[in-house]
Amino acid sequence: MPRPITATIDLDALRHNLAVVRRHAPRSRVLAVIKANAYGHGLLRAARALKDADGFGLVELEAAVRLREAGYSQRIVLLEGFFEPGDLPVMVEHGLAAVVHSPEQLEMLENFGAAGALDVLLKINTGMNRLGFAPQDAVDAFARLSRLAGVGPLSLMTHFASADEARGIAWQVDSFEGVVRGSVRARCIANSAAILRYPETHFEWVRPGIMLYGCSPFSDQVGAELGLKPAMTLESRLIAVQRLRRGDTVGYGGVFTAQRDMRIGIVACGYADGYPRHAPNGTPVCVEGSATGMIGRVSMDMLCVDLEPVPEARVGSPVVLWGAANPIENVATAAGTVGYELMCALAPRVRIVERGGCMIARRPEL
Ligand SMILES: Cc1ncc(COP(=O)(O)O)c(C=O)c1O
């Protein structure tokens, strides 16, 4: 009997969420962002569900090669580009596209010569100040790239820092437009938040990540309110029930003290499964379909929940750590993080159950 924790990945939800992207950006091509093992959902599994995307974006060269070798023929973009000259022949061999964001990469390309028409996206730093050429340097970078026989038609991109917040995107779009004005190159700038909130950013390509997985990019809305379906459900069961007397404490450090006699449940899920250790008392958990809260400190293999709102709960009761019954956004907010981090942290030891269409299959970790 395996440990009762599972992550169910719903392929229909992924397909549904891609359709939501297309509804919002009907004239754009979609570069589905599946980096970090598709935000924890499984690279090849997510690619299979999202096979109708016009392209895939990721940052891991080996993963990009695996995608190609698995037969995906659409555009595959490495969002951080290449890291050393040795990456370039691999990219050319597999027809992978590269974001070029630094003078060092530009130099590597110049030294590489004309070994094939590499698909390049020039990244402009419009205020994120992470990757990209400053607007005043971008025109020169563009000219240098255009002179290279080994580089195919260039596209232009940037990345938003605050598309999900009140600061918005106008300040970055102005800077981007200042550089690309008059250019006929394909542009790719919209992440999930911009796809949902700023149609003026959609251009030729959009670059959704988090919304494909059914999670909201906004702190004040959950995915369901945006018409999205969560693609990951983390579930487990109660493996023990304890009766506390008033004044008893729970778990390591005794950070929860019972204010009254109460029942608590012990869930087979801990930080070694990817549940955030810093989640505080009260972090939402769903037991037997009822909302309750986590109590005490999360340990490696277990966490504890208040069973007062769930009198029928007993050993074996189902627990949803996150999923449609307990939105990941609310768990993340309580734990002071974002849904992105929770999904990506799903641990390899958690058994994956795949659901989608008429198929229910148990598969090993991809
Ligand atoms: C360069 C780039 N583009 C697009 C995305 C997708 O963003 P989101 O998941 O917010 O849609 C990311 C995610 O971090 C990214 O780094």
Image (cartoon, rainbow, N blue to C red):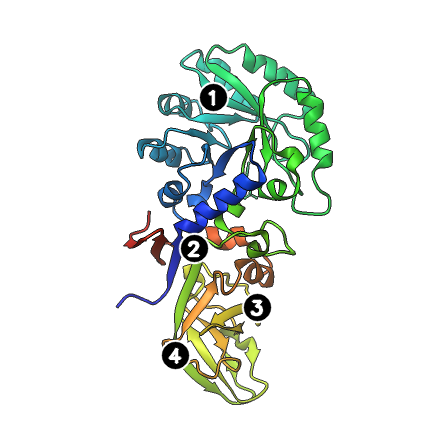
CA separation in Å, label 4 and label 3: 21 Å
Q: Residue at x 49, y 75 (%)?
A: 305
Residue type for callout 1: Asp
Q: Are marks 3 and 2 in contact (CB under 8 Å)?
A: no
Could you tell which of marks 1 and 3 lies nearer the N-terminus? 1
Q: Secondary structure at mark 2?
A: loop
Tell us which disc is closer to us: 1 or 3: 1
The label number, if any, that marks residue 240 in the structure image: 4
Can you identify the residue that label 1 sits on?
Answer: 119
Could you tell which of marks 2 and 1 lies nearer the N-terminus? 1
The label number, if any, that marks residue 211 in the structure image: none
Task: Using residue 87 as the reference point, say whether residue 218 is left or right of it.
Answer: right
Q: Are marks 4 and 1 in contact (CB under 8 Å)?
A: no
Q: Residues within 10 Å of mark 2 (few under 14, many from 20)?
A: many
CA separation in Å, label 2 and label 1: 33 Å
Residue type for callout 3: Pro
Residue type for callout 2: Leu
